[in-house]
C-alpha cells in the first residue's frame, strides 16, 4: 500500500504544480477534480476510440441471445477500465476529506456512475442512432453532459464532507 500512496501523492503534486494560474478562477478541489476527471475522461475517449475502431472493428457484438451495437460495446469496455480509475482518483485526490466510509463512498460512486452510464447510453443512442452523428464526437458531447452531472453528485453526495460552522 505504501507504493499506492506514493503514486497518489505524486499525481497530486503534479496536479498542484499546474494550479497557481487557475487559483483565481476556481478552488483547489475543483481544479483537482477537473484535472483527475479530465485525465480519466481523456483515457475514456481514447479507449472508446481504440475499442470501437480496432478491437470491435465497428462490428456488432453478437452474444447469441442479444446483439450489442459497436458504439455501446465500446462504451462498456472503456467503462470497465475507467470506473475503478475514476473512483481512486476522486477518493484520494479530488475529495480526500470525506467523512463517509470507503464502502459507502464506493456504493454512492457506483450510483452516481450509473446515472452517468444512463446519460451516456441515452445520449449515445440519441446522437448516433436517431440524429445520425458520428460515434466519437457523439461520445465527446455525451461526456460533457455526464461531467456536469457527475461533479455535482460526487461533491454533494458521494464524497460529502462535514460542514463546520
Image (cartoon, rainbow, N blue to C red):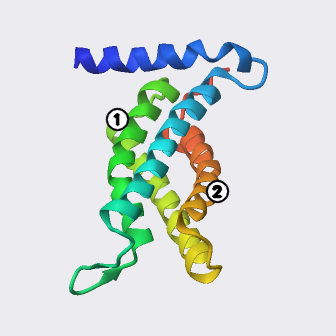
Q: Quadrant of residue 2?
A: top left
Q: Which mark is residue 30?
A: none
Where is mark 1, residue-wise? 102
- Packing grade of label 2 (10 A; few <14, some 14-19, many >=20) is some
Q: State whether residue 108 appears in this view.
A: no
User: In this rendering, which labeled residue sits more in front, label 1 or label 2?
Assistant: 2
Which one is nearer the viewer's eye here, 56 or 119?
Answer: 56
Q: Quadrant of the C terminus?
A: top right
Secondary element type, mark 1: helix
Where is mark 2, residue-wise? 145
Relative to 160, does residue 144 appear above or below in the rendering?
below
Cβ atoms at labels 1 and 2 below 8 Å apart: no
C-alpha span from label 1 to label 2: 27 Å
Identify the residue at horizontal 58%, vertical 69% (top origin): 134
Q: Quadrant of residue 17?
A: top right
Q: Quadrant of the N terminus?
A: top left
Which one is nearer the viewer's eye here, 28 or 81?
Answer: 81
Q: Position of residue 131 (x, y in %)?
A: 65, 79
Q: Position of residue 60 (x, y in %)?
A: 34, 78
Give left or right: position of 59 versus 64: right
Identify the residue at horizontal 29%, vertical 84% (top origin): 66
Q: Position of residue 133 (x, y in %)?
A: 62, 73
Identify the residue at horizontal 51%, vertical 60% (top origin): 115
Identify the residue at horizontal 64%, vertical 30% (top origin): 30
Give left or right: position of 2 versus 139: left
Count of numbered tags: 2
Q: State whether residue 23 appears in this view.
A: yes
Secondary element type, mark 2: helix
Mark before the other along the chain sequence, 1 or 2: 1
Amino acid at each position: 500500500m505504501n507504493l499506492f500512496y506514493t503514486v497518489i501523492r505524486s499525481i497530486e503534486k503534479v496536479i498542484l504544480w499546474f494550479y497557481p494560474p487557475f487559483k483565481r478562477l476556481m478552488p483547489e478541489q475543483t481544479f483537482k477534480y477537473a484535472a483527475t476527471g479530465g485525465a480519466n475522461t481523456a483515457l475514456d475517449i481514447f479507449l472508446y476510440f481504440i475499442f470501437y475502431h480496432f478491437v470491435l472493428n465497428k462490428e456488432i457484438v453478437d452474444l447469441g441471445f442479444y446483439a450489442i451495437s459497436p458504439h455501446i460495446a465500446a462504451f462498456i469496455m472503456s467503462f470497465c477500465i475507467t470506473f475503478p480509475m475514476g473512483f481512486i482518483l476522486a477518493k484520494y485526490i479530488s475529495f480526500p476529506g470525506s467523512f463517509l466510509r470507503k464502502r459507502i463512498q464506493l456504493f454512492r460512486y457506483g450510483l452516481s456512475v450509473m446515472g452517468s452510464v444512463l446519460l451516456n447510453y441515452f445520449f449515445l443512442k440519441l446522437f448516433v442512432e436517431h440524429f445520425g452523428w458520428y460515434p466519437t464526437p457523439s461520445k465527446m458531447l455525451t461526456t460533457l453532459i455526464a461531467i456536469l452531472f457527475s461533479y455535482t453528485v460526487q461533491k454533494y453526495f458521494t464524497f460529502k464532507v462535514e460542514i463546520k460552522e
